[in-house]
Image: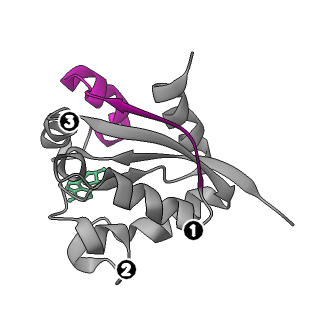
């Protein structure tokens, strides 16, 4: 049975800064994930803190929010078959050193912080994250 989903993807500041937007978008579209909407935006630290609220108890939370708000990012709604899980497969492990060959983080990630992309981790969070960036 088909299971077409939407998920939220972010191209993070390290990848935007290195002009990797088109390369990363091409990985999604070549793999049949449609980019339904996209937006280049520079979040404030407060907005980044709101976006990453689920991580607020983690020791790396403050650095994470500082980093996400350090430069422009590209937020995208991706749509396709099992998009939430499939996008996570395309991204690879959070730590680029542990990511599989040909994944986005293996190809472009610099460190666990500068790991080039974010993707929603569940269908439920995908809805929240899409609304965060694209609610009218
Ligand atoms: P992301 O998928 O955007 O979700 C939270 C981010 O926290 C994660 O990618 C990493 O870039 C960042 N992060 C920093 N340190 C850690 C850590 N020790 N474990 C998990 N994520 C981390």
Residue 17 in picture, x, y percent from top left: 17, 47
Q: Secondary structure at mark 2?
A: loop
| Dot 1 and dot 2 residues touching (CB under 8 Å) | no
Question: Would you say residue 129 sits in the magenta stretch?
Answer: no
Instruction: Kindly give the residue lying farthest to the bottom in the view shown.
Output: 101
Question: Would you say residue 51 sits in the magenta stretch?
Answer: yes
Q: CA distance from mark 2 to mark 3?
A: 28 Å
Ligand 1 within 8 Å, label 1 CB: no
Front residue of this view, candidates 127 and 133: 133
**Seen in the image, is 28 located left or right of residue 16?**
right
Residue 90 versus residue 9 in the image, above or below: below
Quarter of the rendering occupied by the C terminus: top right
Disc 2 designates what residue? 102
Q: Residues within 10 Å of mark 1 (few under 14, many from 20)?
A: few
**Seen in the image, is 131 located left or right of residue 103?**
right
Q: Residues within 10 Å of mark 2 (few under 14, many from 20)?
A: few
Q: Who's the residue at 69% across and 51% down the image?
A: 5
What's the image's color scheme?
A: one colour
Residue 53 in picture, x, y percent from top left: 34, 33
Q: Who's the residue at 67% across and 61% down the image?
A: 82
First along the sequence among labels 2 and 3 = 3
Disc 1 designates what residue? 31
**In the picture, residue 110 is in which quadrant?**
bottom left
| Dot 2 and dot 3 residues touching (CB under 8 Å) | no
């Amino acid at each position: 049975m088909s299971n077409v989903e939407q998920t939220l993807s972010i191209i993070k500041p390290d990848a935007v800064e290195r002009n990797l937007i088109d390369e990363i978008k091409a990985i999604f579209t070549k793999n049949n994930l449609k980019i339904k909407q996209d937006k280049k935006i520079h979040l404030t630290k407060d907005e980044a803190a709101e976006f990453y609220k689920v991580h607020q108890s983690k020791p790396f939370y403050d650095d994470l929010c500082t980093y996400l708000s350090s430069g422009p990012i590209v937020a995208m709604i991706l749509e396709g078959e099992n998009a939430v899980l499939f996008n996570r497969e395309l991204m690879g492990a959070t730590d680029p050193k542990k990511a599989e060959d040909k994944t986005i983080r293996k190809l472009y990630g610099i460190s666990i912080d500068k790991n080039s992309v974010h993707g929603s981790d569940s269908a439920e969070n995908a809805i929240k994250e899409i609304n965060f960036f694209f609610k009218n």
